[in-house]
Image: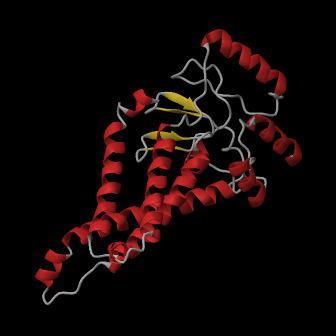
Amino acid sequence: MVQNMFRTGFLVRATHTLLTWVTTLILFLHNTDLRKCEERGELLLPVLFFLLVVLSVLLYFAVSLMDPGFVLTDGVKGVQGSNEEMESMIPQSSTPRLRRCGYCLLQQQPMRAKHCQTCKRCVRRFDHHCPWIENCVGERNHRWFIVYLLVQLLALLWALHIALSGLSPSSTWEVWFRVNGFLLAALAVIGVFSVVVVLLLGCHLYLVSINCTTWEFMSRHRISYLKNCGNEENPFDRGVFCNLWDFFCICRTVMWEQMYHKHVINSV
C-alpha cells in the first residue's frame, strides 16, 4: 500500500492535497465569512469547515490506497482449484464461458472482472481506472468512492459560498483583480472541481441504481455476457431499491455467475 503511494500515484496525490490545503488557506486568510467568524470569536463554522476538508482528504487517501478488489492468484494450482469449485457451482451450459485473462495467471476471470492495464491486475466488478485517485474503482472501494464524492461535493459547495462572500468591490477592474486575485484563483479551482464532482457523482449514482458499471455501460457490445442481451436488458438489475441496498449495505464478494444464471432461467 505504501509502495503504491510512492510510485506513479505520488505526484497526483501530492498535487490534489496541495491544491486542497492552499485553497483552504486562502479562504481562511482572505476577508471571507470564515475570517469574519474568527474575528468575532465564533469558531463553530470555521472548525466544522476545517473538519469537513480533513474528512474529504482522508477519504481521498482511503479510496486511493484501498485494494479495489484485485483478483488473487496463488499460482496455477490455486487457479485450477478455484475453477473446479466454480464449475461445480455454476451450470456452464447456460452461462457464457468465462474468459481467460491474457495478462494474469488467471485461467478464468470472474464475471464482471476486468484486467487493468495501469494496475496490471484483474479487478472484481471493475468500474474504471480513475487517474484522479491513481487507482482502480472496483468491488471493494466503489461505495467509498461515491461516499468520497458526496463529502467532496459538500466541501466544494461550502467553499464556493465562502469564496463568493470574500469578494470585495473596487473602484476599477484593475484594482478589483489585484485585490481579489488569490480568491479568484481559488474560485476557479473550486469551480472546476465542483463541475467534475457533480458529473461523476450523478453518473455513478445512476449506474449504481441500475447495477451497471462504467466499463459495462461503455463497452456493452464487446462484453460476452451482455452483448447477446437486449439493449435495455441488464441481467444484474434487481430494481433501484435492491440495487442501492446491495451496493451500499452488503459488504461481500458476490458470485455474479449465479445471479446471471438465475436471470437466464427466469427469462426462458
Quadrant in which the C terminus is drawn = top right
Q: Position of residue 25 (x, y in %)?
A: 30, 61
Residue placed most toward the observer, 15 or 115? 15
Total marks drawn?
Answer: 0
Report the residue that reaches farthest toward the top: 77
- When the figure is inspected, residue 18 is found, relative to residue 259, above or below; the finding is below
Residue 82 placed where, x, y %?
Answer: 72, 19
Residue 134: x %, y % from top left: 42, 40
Q: Is residue 216 visible to the viewer in this orientation of the structure?
A: no
Residue 186, given in percent of the width and then of the height, sits at: 29, 66
Residue depicted at 56% across the width and 29% down the height: 122
**Horizontally, is 72 left or right of 211 in the view?**
left
Query: Which is more toward the observer, 131 or 165?
Result: 165
**Residue positioned 46% across, 31% down in the render:** 119
Q: Is residue 225 left or right of residue 199?
A: right
Q: Is residue 58 left or right of residue 171?
A: right
Residue 134 visible to the viewer: yes
Q: In percent of the image, x 30 and y 51: which residue is there?
A: 18
Q: Is residue 177 toward the left or the right of residue 124 in the image?
A: left
Where 64 sits versus 70, above or below?
below
